[in-house]
Image (cartoon, rainbow, N blue to C red):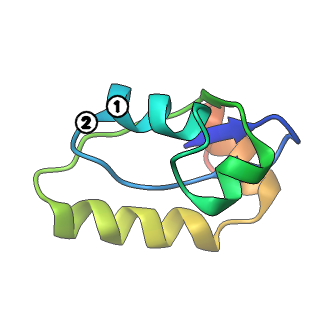
Amino acid sequence: MVRCANGAYYTGITKDLKRRIKAHNSGKGAKYTAAFGPVELVWQRKRKDRSAASVLEAEIKKLSRADKERLLHGKKS
């Protein structure tokens, strides 16, 4: 999960985190981060495969902003 310059959180998956952050910050990542970058990495988790990563991504995207903040600070909701 990254925090965009406008304070919003963006969640995605990648096999190469450094390359993905660089792409987001150069305006070549997702449309949202291109519009509201630069981004700062604030949370990450490794998963065994792309399918598991996609499931986690979907779960995070459903969270409210407050729940995402709790996740960032290691607190359970």
Q: Please indicate, yes or no, whether residue 50 appears anywhere in the rendered image.
A: yes
Q: Position of residue 12 (x, y in %)?
A: 46, 55
Question: Which SS class for mark 1?
Answer: helix
- Image position of 69 with respect to 42: above or below: below
Q: What amino acid type should be assigned to the residue bearing mark 2?
A: Asp
Which image quadrant for residue 49? bottom left
Residue 16, numbered label: 2
Tag of residue 19: 1
User: Residue 14's x, y, as percent?
Assistant: 30, 48
* Residue ID at (51%, 49%): 29
Q: Is residue 28 left or right of residue 44?
A: right
Which residue ends up furthest to the right in the rendered image?
6
From the viewer's side, name the closer residue of 29 and 10: 29
What residue is at 28 percent from the left and 59 percent from the top? 53
Is 30 located above or below residue 14 in the figure? below
Residue in the foreground of this view, choosing between 70 and 58:
58
Name the amino acid, label 1.
Answer: Arg
Q: Taking the image as drawn, is residue 77 in sight?
A: no
Name the residue at 22% across, 64% down: 52
Q: Which mark is residue 75?
A: none
Q: Is residue 61 left or right of residue 54?
A: right
Disc 1 and disc 2: Cα gap in Å?
A: 5 Å
The reply to whether the C-beta atoms of the residues labelled 1 and 2 are less than 8 Å apart is: yes
Residue at image position (61%, 47%) is 76
Position in image of residue 36 (x %, y %): 79, 46
Q: Residues within 10 Å of mark 1 (few under 14, many from 20)?
A: few
Quarter residue 45 falls in: top left
